[in-house]
Image: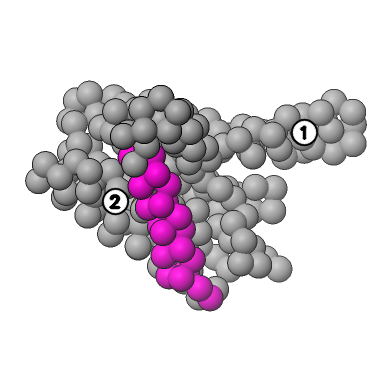
């Protein structure tokens, strides 16, 4: 996060909020499984294998969809020209497909589409072909926040530790919004995520070239 300019930091926080929004809807629609938090799904997979093996297929498929989404986003975003726009365009299409499937009553397809979209979303911020900012998972951000806070207290740096807290807060507040939207609109709340991502794609196209 510290290597991003202020506009890109705001975009990253807004996308983390989008991920929280979608994950909350997926969690409530999918009986306690996640569409962006694969560490949680891995724990659910392990517990299901040990206690209810028939249920293990659900987290396994979600993990597979997420990985496929990551791969699709990486392929779509190959190259530097308009990469963010291309990836966000793909995520918008996947979220739209998930919303349409949910509207038609195909809840499993909707959940799979959300997992695909969240996997692809992690390709928005890349550095040398690797994920620079993970916007759908926050363990790393919280670790960096804690390390930065320690460095700040020692007086040895850590000026940007708050950026990681803001990223986490974006995910948390997005999750609150997603849960409230689910309570009011059900799976139709997913259309908001589609519009949200489409707006982010449009804004990404207006970002100035990064300073080298």
Residue 24: percent from left, percent from top = 35, 32
Residue 123: percent from left, percent from top = 50, 59
Please tell me whether mark 2 sits on a helix, a strand or a loop: helix
Crowd rating for badge 2 (residues with CA inside 10 Å; few <14, some 14–19, many 20+): many
Between 47 and 59, the one lying in front of the other is: 47
Is 78 magenta? The answer is yes
- Residue 114's place in the image compared with 206, above or below, is above
Identified at 77% across, 29% down, the residue is 149
Can residue 185 be seen? yes
212 sits to left or right of 77: right
Can residue 203 be seen? no
Identified at 69% across, 34% down, the residue is 143
The magenta stretch is 58-79
Identified at 58% across, 68% down, the residue is 209
Kindly report which numbered mark, 1 or 2, lies closer to the viewer in this rendering. 2
Between 59 and 115, the one lying in front of the other is: 59
Residue 208: percent from left, percent from top = 55, 65
Which quadrant, please, contains the C terminus? bottom right
Is 40 magenta? The answer is no
Q: Which residue is mark 2?
A: 113
Of the image marks 1 and 2, the number of the one nearer the N terminus: 2
- Residue 62's place in the image compared with 28, above or below, is below
Contact (CB < 8 A) between labels 1 and 2?
no
Query: Mark on residue 147?
Result: 1
151 sits to left or right of 197: right
């Amino acid at each position: 996060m510290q290597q991003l300019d202020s506009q890109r930091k705001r975009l990253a926080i807004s996308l983390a909020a989008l991920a929280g929004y979608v994950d909350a809807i997926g969690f409530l629609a999918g009986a306690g499984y996640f569409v962006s938090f694969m560490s949680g799904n891995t724990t659910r997979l392990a517990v299901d294998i040990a206690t209810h093996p028939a249920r293990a297929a659900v987290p396994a498929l979600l993990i597979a969809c997420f990985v496929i989404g990551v791969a699709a986003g990486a392929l779509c975003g190959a190259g530097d020209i308009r990469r963010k726009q291309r990836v966000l365009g793909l995520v918008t299409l996947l979220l739209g497909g998930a919303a349409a499937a949910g509207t038609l009553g195909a809840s499993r397809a909707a959940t799979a589409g959300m997992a695909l979209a969240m996997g692809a979303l992690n390709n928005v911020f890349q550095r040398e072909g690797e994920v620079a900012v993970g916007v759908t998972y926050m363990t790393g951000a919280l670790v960096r926040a804690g390390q930065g806070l320690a460095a700040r207290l020692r007086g040895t740096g850590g000026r940007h530790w708050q950026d990681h807290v803001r990223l986490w807060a974006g995910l948390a507040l997005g999750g609150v919004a997603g849960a409230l939207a689910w309570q009011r609109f059900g799976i139709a709340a997913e259309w908001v995520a589609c519009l949200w991502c489409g707006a982010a794609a449009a804004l990404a196209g207006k970002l100035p070239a990064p300073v080298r």
